[in-house]
Image (spheres, helix red, strand yellow):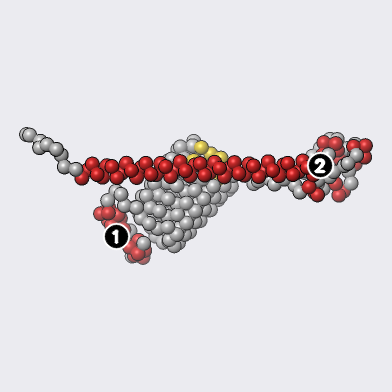
Amino acid sequence: MALLCEAAEKNDISIWNVFVKKSGPSFRAKLFGANLSGMNLKEAKLDKADLSSADLTDTNLIRASLSEARLRGADLSGAKLNYCRLFNADLSGAVLKKADLTGVKARNAVFYDSDLSGAKLENADFTKAKLIHVSLSGARKKGAKINGKIKVKVKSQTAPEPNQIPYYSDSRSLPQKTSDLSAGSRKNIPPGTSEDLSAADYRRSPATAVQDAKISRWLVALEEEEQKKYLRELKEKELKEKERENLERKLGRKKPGFKRIR
């Protein structure tokens, strides 16, 4: 952390990059919750770095390498990520409001519940990336390659309270049209409803409203279960990758069992 800050202050990121290179391919920078706001980290090597919950607002990350990096819950509002490498990076819950991701390479990256509103995504590569429950309002996507798993976040509609629904105990007292309803009852009818529909279509009891609320809670619980399942799978994948790296490291240290005869 101190060395990275020193390199940023001296405007010489090669200090950090040389250190990363000497540390070997298994090096993973631990920058959880670090405050790197406004720093110049142009062309920095931060592959596999843990930047979860880090403050990267207005940070210069142009052409930086963040492949397989963890950026869960990181704040990248207004950050410059032009032509940055984000292969297999995890940006779940990250905030990228008005961030510049022009030409970014984010293949197989994960943007679960991320905020990309107002971001520049022009000519970005999101091939096989998972953009699930993301906010893309106001984002500029001209020339972007987005052919992965996409599910845009929408505003949830909660079920109305029982006392907000017009309820008629006797069907004979129902008005014939919605236009015949009183002003107090008409304000509870959804906007855009035709005036010619029968008011009987809106004869709903408080029990129905309670049932709708239960369904809404069930959908929220189902969504949370899907998120937990995805995080479990991601953790298992990381553990398998770590085991494979350890095995390769051990095999690399072994000396050959025979001498090569020339």
Looking at the picture, how far across and down is residue 80, in whole percent? 45, 54
At 86% from the left edge and 38% from the top edge, which residue is drawn?
199
Front of the two marks 2 and 1: 2
| Residue 195 visible in the current orientation | no
In the rendered structure, find residue 205 and report the number of the disc placed on it: 2
Looking at the picture, how far across and down is residue 238, in whole percent? 39, 44
> The N terminus lies in which quarter of the figure?
bottom left
Q: Which residue is mark 1?
A: 15
On the image, which quarter does residue 33 sit in? bottom left
Residue 158 drawn above or below residue 60: above
Residue 162 drawn above or below residue 172: below
Assign a secondary structure to mark 1: helix
**What amino acid type should be assigned to the residue bearing mark 1?**
Ile
Looking at the picture, how far across and down is residue 24, in whole percent? 27, 51
Q: Nearer the viewer, residue 67 or 259?
A: 259
At 60% from the left edge and 44% from the top edge, which residue is drawn?
221
* 83 left or right, relative to 168: left
> The C terminus lies in which quarter of the figure?
top left
Residue 33 drawn above or below residue 214: below
At 81% from the left edge and 42% from the top edge, which residue is drawn?
205
* 49 left or right, relative to 156: left
**What amino acid type should be assigned to the residue bearing mark 2?**
Ser
Crowd tier of the residue under label 1, counting other residues whose Cα lies within 10 Å: few below 14, some 14–19, many 20 or above: some
At 31% from the left edge and 52% from the top edge, which residue is drawn?
27
